[in-house]
Image: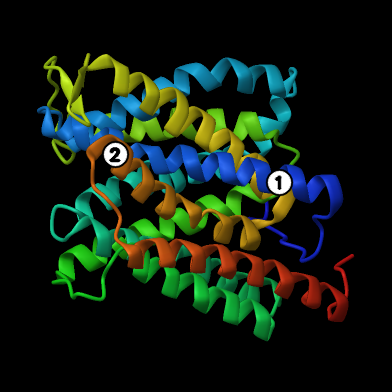
Amino acid sequence: MTAVTDDIPGVASGPRLAGGLAFAVVSALSFGLSGALASGLLAGGWSAGATVLVRVGLAAVVVLPLGIWALGGRWDVLRRNAGTVVLYGLLAVAGAQFCYFSAVQHMQVGPALLIEYTAPAAVVCWLWLRHGQRPGPVTLVGAAVAALGLVLVLDLLSGADLSPVGVAWSLAAMVGAASYFLISADTTSGLPPLALAAGGLVVGSLALALLGLVGLLPMRASTAAVSYADREVAWWVPLLVLGLVTAAVAYCTGIAAGRRLGSRLASFVALLEVVAGVLFAWLLLEELPRAVQLVGGLLVLVGVVGVKLGERQTARVEPTPA
């Protein structure tokens, strides 16, 4: 298994930075759409387990041919990185989603999502402890501002009941999310991003199916029409979008972003997923965001900029690893 990541600050610049940010934004928007779409399916009789299995399974079917094409016959690269692919599928795909859905069975969605999205802080701590990449003061301030923005976006200032069991599941989901950013940013393995995405989705699908077979992940489906913003659509429409957009596109662009930006910056840009989730809930579920949530979204953007500025300062004072 290769090293998880060597996240060199300041690597991304110019077109590489612009491309990485574009991929990261597309990934965040795609992931952010999943919550609103899944809510309609859950209200229509689908279980969380069945929804996430179809989502990941469909994405695996779509991305697998692309992953094989990206390998170009270099099966030795896949064999050398088999451990990384399995770890990615179990933690970043199946683990993160299974733990998140388990968390929301015991607590509100907002607090569970906020706890999961402490992952960027975990990424910064890992890079500091494991690779000696000590965050500068600007990075720390940016992280704090982004965290405050998330609190406002999720409207937690009014207070929320936290279940110890739910918190434990949310922290486990955070580990999965942090693993997603760290493994996605690994540029030393030689494994193409599409191959990593395909392998992870296949492993994740198999793991979720196994959880369903043993009864740990309830599987319940329905062919009833699904309602969004007072409009009904066929049940297969949101499932198709969940698989193609919120999984296939989201994971592929997320890995591409991590390769260009590094795990630290990519993880903070991914905080836009929470903002996107609020906006899509507004459009599809008619859940209007409050003014405080809009302010929170702005703070998230400010925090992301702060993290990038902090990386540039770190790049000037830290030697580049050989």
Q: Residue at x 16, y 41 (%)?
A: 216
Residue for badge 2: 36
- Type of the residue with mark 1: Gly
Q: Which residue is mark 1?
A: 20
141 relative position to 111: left or right = right
Q: Secondary structure at mark 2?
A: helix
Residue 147: horizontal and vertical position, in percent?
A: 45, 72
Disc 1 crowd rating (10 Å Cα; few below 14, some 14-19, many 20+) is many
Q: Secondary structure at mark 1?
A: helix
Identify whether 302 is placed above or below 98: below
Residue ranking furthest to the front: 291
The image shows residue 238 at horizontal and vertical percentages of 30, 23
Left or right of 311 on screen, residue 127: left
User: Is 311 left or right of 236, judged from the image as shown?
Assistant: right
Q: Residue at x 14, y 14 (%)?
A: 223
Q: Between marks 1 and 2, how big is the CA–CA gap? A: 26 Å
